[in-house]
Amino acid sequence: MTNSAAAMRYARALLEVSRRDADPERVEQELSGVADLVNSHPALASSLANPAIPPARKRALVTELVPLMGDISTVTRRLLELLADRDRLSILDDILNVYRSELLHFRGVAQVQITTASELSPERVEVITRALGEATGRQVEVQTGVDTDLLGGMVTQIGSTVFDGSIAGHLNRLRRQFLSDR
């Protein structure tokens, strides 16, 4: 199983368990804290990801670290122990990213990425956010980006769906159509 597929499975299971047995928001904060701790100490990160170190030693390390991190929920502690036992601590960041995405989906929030040829004004972003919220029936979190190669218009990505309303996108579609009509 690939790391991304494994991260998806762990994150979805974690959300299901945290919805039942804990506060999903708290679990996200705890997992984020653990990831920050690991990422801020390169020696710790490399030890946890090193396949030469047996899973039993990694679990022992996790068992020692968890109490030092304060009041961590049983759900988060059990996930860390499970990842150590299965030698999967190296995908902790991936699990966190998928968990955050799944948590937003659970809360009814749509993540939208808007890319334009020039920076959008805050007022324009607000209008687009409101319109997307009405269209999707969900709360919308918008992130904007600039890509001068678009020439004009915008590319909007909601989840895995991309709506290309850029001039560059229109020109590419016209080019493909002309070439296929020959």
Image (cartoon, rainbow, N blue to C red):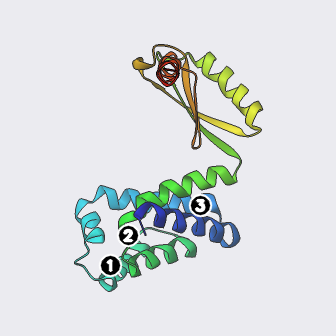
User: What amino acid is labelled 2 in the image?
Assistant: Leu
- Asked which secondary structure carries label 3, the reply is helix
User: What amino acid is labelled 1 in the image?
Assistant: Lys
Which residue lies under the disc numbered 1? 58
Q: Quadrant of residue 63?
A: bottom left
Circles 3 and 2 in contact, beta carbons < 8 Å: no
Tell me if residue 89 comes above or below residue 56 in the rendering: above
User: What amino acid is labelled 3 in the image?
Assistant: Arg
Which residue lies under the disc numbered 3? 26
Q: How many marks?
A: 3
User: Residue 155: x, y in percent?
Assistant: 54, 26
User: Residue 119: x, y in percent?
Assistant: 48, 17
Circles 2 and 1 in contact, beta carbons < 8 Å: yes
Picture residue at 51% right of the left edge, 77% below the top: 78
User: Residue 39: x, y in percent?
Assistant: 33, 57
Which residue lies under the disc numbered 2? 89
Circles 1 and 3 in contact, beta carbons < 8 Å: no
Q: Earlier in the sequence, mark 3 or mark 2?
A: 3
- Compared across the picture, whether 113 is left or right of 110 comes to left
Tell me if residue 65 comes above or below residue 142 in the rendering: below
**Which of these two is toward me, 118 or 47?**
118
**Which of these two is toward me, 148 or 130?**
148
Q: Residues within 10 Å of mark 1 (few under 14, many from 20)?
A: many
Q: Residues within 10 Å of mark 3 (few under 14, many from 20)?
A: some
- Mark 3–mark 2 Cα distance, whole angstroms, equals 20 Å
User: Residue 94: x, y in percent?
Assistant: 44, 58
Q: Earlier in the sequence, mark 1 or mark 3?
A: 3
Picture residue at 65% right of the left edge, 68% below the top: 16
Picture residue at 44% right of the left edge, 78% below the top: 81
- Asked which secondary structure carries label 1, the reply is helix
